[in-house]
Every structure is written in structure tokens, then in C-alpha cells.
Image (cartoon, rainbow, N blue to C red):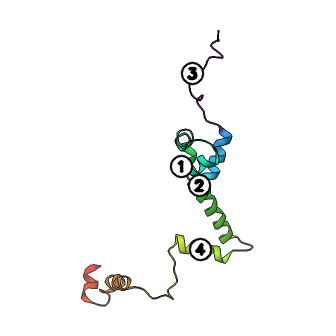
């Protein structure tokens, strides 16, 4: 007769959360893998990955972006050897700098004219 310790129900035993696996999943999602791709790497159904590791799936990308941004910022602002390319990239992305060598389109011209059309006219005094 089977004892309670050896008796098992049907199907697989329930999984659970594994902290080592959680770190691996967080690293994979930080590198851009989806939950479907992660479930291919570790033999686990995508639903199970989402069930037990949703926090890692959500936190991985923003934390990776933060680490890259910190690294880029350090390179751009290094006092001894600043990285000019990193500084330019940062300013284009964060400060909306752009090069004006290229032609601007009709919509940009119309927008620019709309913003400065009152300059030097009677409207300028009324709008201030």
C-alpha cells in the first residue's frame, strides 16, 4: 500500500519560483528576449514564465536602459577623457539636438513660420 509521502496525483508536480532562474530570466529579458523566446531557452511554458517571473519580465528592460544610460553618461562626462560621440548621442536623444544640414520639410517650415510670424508686427505687442 502506498504511503501519503509516495502517493502523488496526476500530472507534473507544480513548479515554483527559483531565484537563480529569476536572475537568468531578468538578464535575458534585459537583453531583449521575449517571454516566448525565454521559454524556448529554459524548457518552460511561456504562461509559467509569466506566472512565476512577471516581476523580472517587467523590471529587466528599464533596469538595462538605466545601466546603459549611466554608462553613456559617465563616458560623455568623464573629466579626464570625455567621449565626444557619447556626448553628441546623449544631446541628440535627451536634449533634442539635431543637425540642421538637411533640408527641413514643408510642415516644419509652416510650424516655424507660425511660431515667429508675429515678430515685428502689431500682433507681437498684443500676444505679450
Distance between the alpha carbons at the discs numbered 4 and 3:
58 Å
Q: Taking 7 as reference, is 93 left or right?
A: left
Label whose residue precedes the other's in the sequence (1 or 4) = 1
Give SS at disc 1: helix
Label whose residue precedes the other's in the sequence (2 or 4) = 2
Q: Residue at x 43, y 86 (%)?
A: 104
In-front residue for pair 107/54:
54
Distance between the alpha carbons at the discs numbered 1 and 3:
34 Å
- Find out whether residue 62 is within the magenta segment: no
Q: Residues within 10 Å of mark 2 (few under 14, many from 20)?
A: some
Label whose residue precedes the other's in the sequence (1 or 2) = 2
The magenta stretch is 3-18
- Which residue has dot 4 on it? 89
Circles 1 and 2, Cβ within 8 Å, touching? The answer is no
Determine which quarter of the picture holds residue 90.
Answer: bottom right
Give SS at disc 2: loop
Distance between the alpha carbons at the discs numbered 1 and 4:
26 Å
Q: Which of pointers 1 and 2 indicates the residue nearer the eye?
A: 2
Distance between the alpha carbons at the discs numbered 1 and 2:
12 Å
- Which residue has dot 1 on it? 58
Amino acid at each position: 500500500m502506498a504511503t501519503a509521502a509516495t502517493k502523488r496525483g496526476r500530472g507534473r508536480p507544480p513548479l515554483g519560483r527559483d531565484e537563480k532562474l529569476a536572475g537568468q530570466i531578468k538578464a535575458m529579458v534585459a537583453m531583449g528576449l521575449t517571454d516566448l523566446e525565454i521559454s524556448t531557452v529554459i524548457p518552460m511554458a511561456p504562461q509559467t514564465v509569466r506566472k512565476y517571473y512577471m516581476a523580472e519580465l517587467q523590471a529587466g528592460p528599464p533596469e538595462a536602459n538605466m545601466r546603459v544610460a549611466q554608462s553613456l553618461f559617465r563616458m560623455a562626462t568623464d573629466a579626464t577623457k570625455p567621449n565626444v560621440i557619447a556626448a553628441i548621442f546623449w544631446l541628440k536623444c535627451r536634449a533634442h539636438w539635431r543637425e540642421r544640414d538637411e533640408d527641413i520639410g514643408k510642415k516644419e517650415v509652416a510650424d516655424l513660420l507660425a511660431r515667429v510670424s508675429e515678430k515685428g508686427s502689431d500682433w507681437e505687442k498684443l500676444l505679450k
